[in-house]
Image (spheres, grey):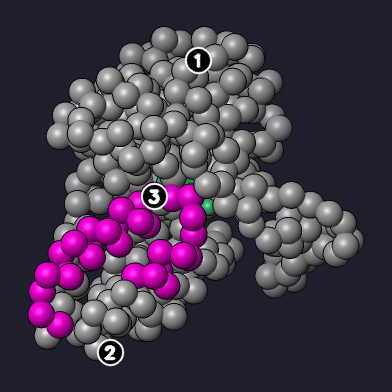
C-alpha cells in the first residue's frame, strides 16, 4: 500500500540479510517511525511490545527474527532457543506458531552452516505468500461485498473492528483487502471504523484508509450497535487471530458484540483470514488462549497534548483493578462466511475442509 503515495510494505528486509526495518506501530497514527531489528531480542521485543502487530505480520516478523537470530550461530541449541523465545512473545495469534513451526521444519534437517541462508529465504517466502494470499482474499471478498443485501448501488457501508489492514500484514491486509478492492473497482465504499479500546487499533485503520483515500468515519466502540440497528451498515468484515477447526473465530475483543448485533439485524458478518490463521489442530474456539495484557494499557490514554507532543494521561488511579482481555471468541454460528485466499466458505468444519481438503486428517 502507499504511504504519502509511495508503495510501502510493513517490513523492509536489509540487503545484507542481517536485519529488517519495521514501522513502530505504537507511534502511529501520530508519527511514522521506522525501527531497525537486528537481534533476536529486538524481534521478540517488537512483537511483545506490539511495535508490530496483527496476526500475519507477527508471523512474518517472527520468521525474519529467527533468520536474524541464526546469524550469530545456527546449531541445534541456538535454533531451539530462538524458536522458544519467539514462540512465547504472544499467545493468541496462531500465525506466530504456524510460521515458527514452518521455519523449524525447514531448518532442522539442514546442517547448521546452511540454516541462516535457508531461514532468510523461508522468511521471504512467508512474506511474499502473505501478500499474494491477502490480494486473493480481496478478490473473493469483493464478490461478496457486491452482493451485500442492503447495498443498492448507492454508498456501500462496511463496518470493521480493530486493524486487519495492511499494517496487520506484510501488505494488502486481510479484512481491509476487499475494501481496498471495492474502492479500486470504483464502488462508492465508506467504512465505519470502531476505535477498538483499549489500544485503539481502529486509529491505525483510519490512518491507512486515509493514505489510500477510502472514505471512512471513526466511531466509539459503543456506537456500533445503533449503526447496525439503524440500517447504516451493509456488511461487517473483520480479521482473525485464530480460527478453530469448527469455524469459531478469535479476534480483537469487541468482535463478538458486533457479530451478535449483526445476527440480530440480518447483516452479513464476514471474517477474512489466510490459511495461516486457521488452527486445524484445535477443534473448537473455547480452547483458544486469550491474551490478558497489562492493565496500564487500559488505565492510560495516549495521544498528543495541546502542543502536539505525544503524552499519556491516567484515566484511572494506578491501583484501580482492571481486566484487559485482548481478544474474544465469536461462535461459528454468528459468522456468515470465512473469506480465505481459496475463496469463501461457511464457518464450519465441513466448510473449511471444503477449501482445505488436505487438512482432513486433523482432529
Ligand atoms: O493485538 P493485535 O493488535 O495484534 O490484534 C490483532 C489484530 O490486529 C486483530 O485482532 C485483527 O482483527 C486480526 S489480525 C489481521
Local packing at callout 2 (Cα closer than 10 Å; few below 14, some 14-19, many 20+) is few
Mark sitting earlier along the chain (2/1): 2
Determine if the magenta segment contains residue 87: yes
Instruction: Determine the main secondary structure of the stretch shown in magenta.
Output: helix
Residue 224 in the image, given as x and y percentages of width and height: 64, 28
Residue 196 in the image, given as x and y percentages of width and height: 62, 44
Residue at the spot 22% in from the left edge and 58% down from the top edge:
102
Determine which quarter of the picture holds residue 254: top right
The one nearer the camera, 120 or 84, is: 84
Residue identified by numbered label 2: 72
Residue that extends furthest to the bottom in the rendered view of this protein:
72
Residue at the spot 35% in from the left edge and 32% down from the top edge:
245
Mark sitting earlier along the chain (1/3): 3
Local packing at callout 1 (Cα closer than 10 Å; few below 14, some 14-19, many 20+) is many
Q: Are marks 3 and 2 in contact (CB under 8 Å)?
A: no
Residue identified by numbered label 3: 94
Cα–Cα span, label 2 and label 1: 52 Å
Q: Is residue 167 visible from the viewing direction of this image? A: yes
Name the secondary structure under disc 2. Answer: helix
From which residue to which does the magenta span run? 83-112
Residue 338 in the image, given as x and y percentages of width and height: 35, 27
Name the secondary structure under disc 3. Answer: helix
- The numbered mark at residue 13 is none
Residue identified by numbered label 1: 267
Determine if the magenta segment contains residue 234: no
Local packing at callout 3 (Cα closer than 10 Å; few below 14, some 14-19, many 20+) is many
The one nearer the camera, 44 or 52, is: 44
Cα–Cα span, label 1 and label 3: 28 Å
Cα–Cα span, label 3 and label 2: 27 Å
Counting labels gives: 3
Image quadrant holding the C terminus, namely top left
Residue 322 in the image, given as x and y percentages of width and height: 79, 52
Amino acid at each position: 500500500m502507499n504511504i504519502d503515495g509511495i508503495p510501502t510494505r510493513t517490513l523492509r528486509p536489509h540487503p545484507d540479510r542481517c536485519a529488517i526495518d519495521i514501522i513502530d506501530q505504537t507511534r502511529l497514527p501520530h508519527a511514522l517511525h521506522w525501527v531497525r531489528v537486528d537481534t533476536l531480542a529486538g524481534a521478540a521485543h517488537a512483537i511483545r511490545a506490539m511495535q508490530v502487530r496483527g496476526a500475519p505480520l507477527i508471523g512474518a516478523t517472527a520468521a525474519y527474527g529467527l533468520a536474524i537470530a541464526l546469524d550469530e550461530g545456527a546449531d541445534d541449541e541456538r535454533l531451539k532457543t530462538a524458536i522458544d523465545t519467539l514462540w512465547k512473545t504472544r499467545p493468541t495469534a496462531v500465525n506466530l506458531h504456524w510460521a515458527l513451526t514452518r521455519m523449524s521444519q525447514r531448518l532442522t534437517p539442514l546442517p547448521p552452516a546452511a540454516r541462516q541462508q535457508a531461514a532468510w529465504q523461508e522468511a521471504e517466502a512467508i512474506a511474499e505468500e502473505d501478500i499474494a494470499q491477502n490480494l486473493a482474499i480481496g478478490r473473493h471478498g469483493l464478490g461478496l461485498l457486491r452482493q451485500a443485501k442492503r447495498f443498492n448501488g448507492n454508498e456501500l457501508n462496511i463496518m470493521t473492528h480493530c486493524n486487519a489492514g495492511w499494517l496487520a500484514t506484510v501488505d494488502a491486509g486481510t479484512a481491509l483487502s476487499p475494501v481496498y478492492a471495492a474502492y479500486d473497482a470504483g464502488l462508492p465504499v465508506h467504512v465505519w471504523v470502531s476505535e477498538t479500546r483499549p489500544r485503539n487499533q481502529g486509529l491505525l485503520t483510519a490512518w491507512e484508509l486515509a493514505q489510500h483515500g477510502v472514505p471512512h468515519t471513526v466511531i466509539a466502540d459503543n456506537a456500533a450497535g445503533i449503526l447496525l440497528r439503524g440500517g447504516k451498515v451493509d456488511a461487517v468484515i473483520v480479521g482473525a487471530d485464530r480460527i478453530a477447526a469448527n469455524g469459531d473465530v478469535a479476534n480483537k475483543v469487541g468482535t463478538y458484540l458486533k457479530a451478535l448485533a449483526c445476527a440480530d439485524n440480518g447483516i452479513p458478518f464476514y471474517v477474512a483470514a489466510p490459511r495461516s490463521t486457521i488452527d486445524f489442530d484445535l477443534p473448537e474456539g473455547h480452547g483458544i488462549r486469550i491474551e490478558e495484557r497489562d492493565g496500564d494499557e487500559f488505565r492510560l490514554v495516549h495521544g498528543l497534548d495541546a502542543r502536539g507532543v505525544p503524552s499519556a494521561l491516567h484515566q484511572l488511579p494506578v491501583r484501580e483493578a482492571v481486566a484487559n482481555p485482548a481478544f474474544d471468541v465469536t461462535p461459528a454460528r454468528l459468522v456468515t462466511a470465512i473469506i480465505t485466499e481459496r475463496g469463501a466458505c461457511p464457518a464450519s468444519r465441513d466448510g473449511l475442509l471444503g477449501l482445505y481438503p488436505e487438512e482432513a486428517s486433523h482432529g
